[in-house]
Image (cartoon, rainbow, N blue to C red):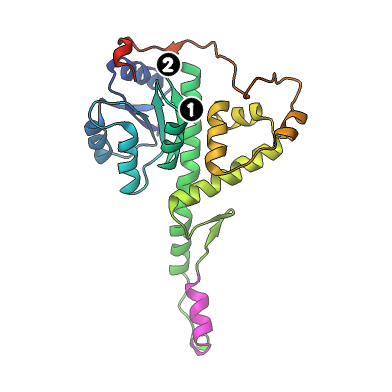
Amino acid sequence: MSARILVVDDEANIRALIDEILSEEGYEVTAAADAKEARAARKDQEFDLILLDIWMPDTDGISLLREWSENGAPGTVVMMSGHGTVDTAVEATRFGALEFLEKPIAMARLLTAVRSGLERGRVMRNLRMAAPASLTSIAAAPAATPIAEADGAAAKHAEISQPTEHNGVALDQPLRDARDQFERVYFEYHLARENYSMTRVADRAGLERTHLYRKLKQLGIELSRGSRRNDRTPDEVPTAHEMPAVRSEPPVYSQRSHEYDD
């Protein structure tokens, strides 16, 4: 079954173009023009990934993401905006967004973000399913024998004990904290594996280097500037702030005037 993706953007040409690109890649796409349509779409079905614009006329994307987060898991969300800031990106990740795409969005960048978001969403769903699976196996265990009952409180405690950790992630904590813990372990692993090469870690995670820096800052992962310079590989060209080079892919342009750009 193909992945289901919800595209929420008030610009009709952007919605149609993203719909066309993702449909050609085999994804099942649903488009929504505003927050009202997005809410209705989520009531009708579950989505594997949501591409959510920030600036919309009735309810902005950050407010809608906060609403979904407060009502439970917001789902796997990638934010989009033409005038995003670092503070906006950090706020979006605080409410559960996985990534932040800046418009105009190059087609290759869009597809990379979609594949990365779907994979990370799959990992998080597996983590959520781990606890119920453990409870099911406990419930299916045979009843205690009279000998076991004679053991008293110790036997009873052994029967009802539940795992509180899975793959190094504590399960007895809010989902947002569990996701942050998983992402912290994930990025620390790849930073060490790639010898702190931000280019290679960004490519492996499917992120722009600017967003990778934001994510590491939001997760509280400190980088050693001195060791970073010493560990730079020959294929990396240093810039003032480790900013990525300008990409040459054709962007997804908005046809509206700048007065109404997101």
**Residue 23 in view (yes/no):** yes
Nearest to N terminus: mark 1 or mark 2 = 2
The image position of residue 160, as x and y in percent, is 47, 73
Q: Is residue 162 magenta?
A: no
Work out which quarter of the rendered image holds the N terminus and state it: top left
Q: Which mark is residue 113?
A: 1
The image position of residue 257, as x and y in percent, is 30, 9
- Circle 1 — which element? helix
Looking at numbered disc 2 in the image, what kind of residue is underneath it? Answer: Pro
Residue on which the image places disc 2: 104
* Mark 2 crowd level (few <14, some 14–19, many ≥20, 10 Å Cα): some
Residue at 63% x, 32% y: name it. 201
* Mark 1 crowd level (few <14, some 14–19, many ≥20, 10 Å Cα): many
Which of these two is toward me, 132 or 99? Answer: 99
Q: Quadrant of residue 187?
A: top right
Q: Is residue 160 magenta?
A: yes
| 70 relative to 90 in the view: left or right | left
Which of these two is toward me, 80 or 116? Answer: 80
Looking at numbered disc 1 in the image, what kind of residue is underneath it? Answer: Ala
Q: Quadrant of residue 238?
A: top right
**Residue 140 in view (yes/no):** no
Q: How far apart are the two marked residues, 1 and 2, measured between alpha carbons?
A: 14 Å
| 93 relative to 28 in the view: left or right | right
The image position of residue 219, as x and y in percent, is 54, 43
Work out which quarter of the rendered image holds the C terminus and state it: top left
Q: Which mark is residue 189?
A: none
In the picture as drawn, the residue positioned furthest to the bottom comes out as: 150
* Residue stretch in magenta: 149-161
| 90 relative to 32 in the view: left or right | right
46 vs 141: above or below: above
